[in-house]
Image (cartoon, rainbow, N blue to C red):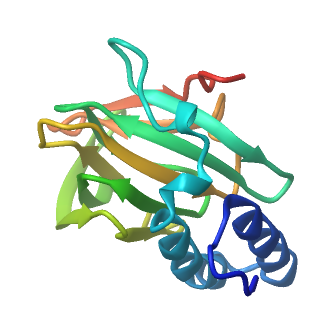
């Protein structure tokens, strides 16, 4: 781990590169990454300012670093923004830089073609500095910004989500395909 007093995005990238070379288990990768991401989100000045705001009328989603074993993005949730229950097809670690986000975790049980039963496992309000880990088998969640201010997060995933075929579920259990949009900066 880098020993500089201020933990930077560059330090985080170096540490994550080392961790993803040393570990193959999603549990171990996320376990080792979570405290480092918590350290990074406490230093928002290490993220370029243009990636900490959303364009008028849309959620901000920017790639900060793309590597073969992981990607780092910033996500800006506007007031009232919501993502229904969805999966990721990879491990992930999410840290809140500013404001707060409500995360609902689900257990999904198939209930016929195109349908599922969604069981709410937990609802957590993550505040600035908070971190959430996602591992395959426990990575279906929904996100909601219930506040009147933008919420800024850093997302780290084991795969690039742009163009990755995933799934999402409406509140009634209707399954729909989910393909993430491209990032705003590339």
Can you say which quadrant of the picture contains the C terminus? top right
Location of residue 116 (image quadrant) = top left
**In this picture, is 48 found above or below 33?**
above
Farthest residue to the front: give it.
Answer: 5
Farthest residue to the top: give it.
Answer: 57
Residue at 76% from the left image edge and 61% from the top image edge: 10
Horizontal arrangement in the rendering, residue 56 relative to residue 45 (left or right):
left
**Front residue of this view, candidates 119 and 12:** 12
Residue 72: % across, % down: 65, 51
Residue at 31% from the left image edge and 63% from the top image edge: 128
On the question of residue 76 being in view, the answer is yes
Residue 76: % across, % down: 40, 37
**Front residue of this view, candidates 82 and 9:** 9
Residue at 40% from the left image edge and 68% from the top image edge: 132
Residue 183: % across, % down: 62, 26
Horizontal arrangement in the rendering, residue 50 relative to residue 163 (left or right):
left
């Amino acid at each position: 781990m880098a020993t500089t007093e201020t933990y930077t995005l560059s330090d985080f990238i170096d540490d994550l590169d080392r961790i993803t070379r040393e570990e193959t288990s999603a549990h171990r990768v996320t376990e080792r990454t979570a405290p480092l991401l918590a350290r990074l989100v406490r230093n928002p000045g290490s993220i370029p300012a243009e990636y900490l705001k959303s364009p008028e009328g849309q959620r901000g989603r920017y790639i900060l670093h793309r590597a073969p074993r992981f990607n780092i993005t910033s996500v800006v949730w506007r007031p009232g923004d919501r993502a229904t229950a969805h999966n990721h097809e990879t491990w992930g670690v999410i840290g809140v830089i500013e404001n707060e986000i409500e995360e609902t975790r689900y257990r999904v049980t198939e209930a016929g073609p195109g349908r599922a039963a969604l069981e709410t496992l937990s609802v957590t309000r993550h505040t600035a500095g908070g971190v959430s880990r996602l591992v395959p088998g426990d990575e279906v969640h929904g996100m909601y910004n219930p506040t009147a201010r933008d919420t800024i997060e850093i997302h780290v995933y084991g795969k690039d989500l742009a163009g990755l075929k995933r799934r999402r579920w409406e509140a009634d259990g209707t399954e729909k395909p989910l393909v993430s949009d491209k990032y705003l900066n590339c």
